[in-house]
Image (cartoon, grey):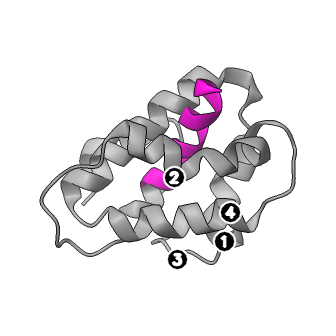
Amino acid sequence: MDGLMKLSYLIFACMIVAGPITSNAALACTTVKVILKPCFPYLTQRAPLTSRCCNGVRNLNGRALTTLDRRQVCRCIKSAAKNAGPRLDTTRAAGIPRACGVNIPRSYKISTSTNCNTLR
């Protein structure tokens, strides 16, 4: 289950980068995991994308308001993706923002190779 969570984090790290900067504390990985947990079956088991997953994506995007938040979420997602290993469907992961109607800049790559320190 941890692997599934990590996969979801990778996908949403880039989405979060697009948010405005207004808060002071970074989000904890445990918080990110809880928010994205409904997405794990979609990312690892070929299950359908659910409204609960999309609601989590929107929630996380709305909560990661600072550069520190976005970088932390990115790190959490990358860690989860590494733990998910080959179970992670990277194509599905990259498509979640669009599928859920969450707009992120095209320059933000949803990838395990994303350098989280470059996110603003």
> Is label 4 in a helix, a strand or a loop?
helix
Q: Which residue is mark 3?
A: 103
What label does residue 35 carry, if any?
2
Amino acid type indicated by mark 4: Arg
Q: Quadrant of the N terminus?
A: top right
- Mark 4 or mark 3, earlier in chain: 4
**Residue 29 appears in the rendering:** yes
> Is label 2 in a helix, a strand or a loop?
helix
**Residue 113 appears in the rendering:** no
Q: Position of residue 91 (x, y in %)?
A: 73, 48
Q: Quadrant of the C terminus?
A: bottom left
Q: Position of residue 37 (x, y in %)?
A: 61, 45
Classify 44 as above or below 36: above
Amino acid type indicated by mark 3: Asn
Circles 4 and 3: CB atoms closer than 8 Å: no
Q: How far is mark 3 from mark 2, CA to CA?
A: 18 Å
Q: How far is mark 2 from mark 4, CA to CA?
A: 9 Å
Amino acid type indicated by mark 2: Ile
What label does residue 30 carry, if any?
none
Classify 40 as above or below 67: above
Circles 1 and 3: CB atoms closer than 8 Å: no
- Mark 3 or mark 2, earlier in chain: 2
Q: Which residue is mark 4?
A: 52
Q: How far is mark 4 from mark 1, CA to CA?
A: 10 Å
**Residue in the foreground of this view, choosing between 111 and 13:** 13
Amino acid type indicated by mark 1: Cys
Residue at image location 77% in from the left, 42% down from the top: 41
Front label number (4 vs 3): 4
What label does residue 100 carry, if any?
1
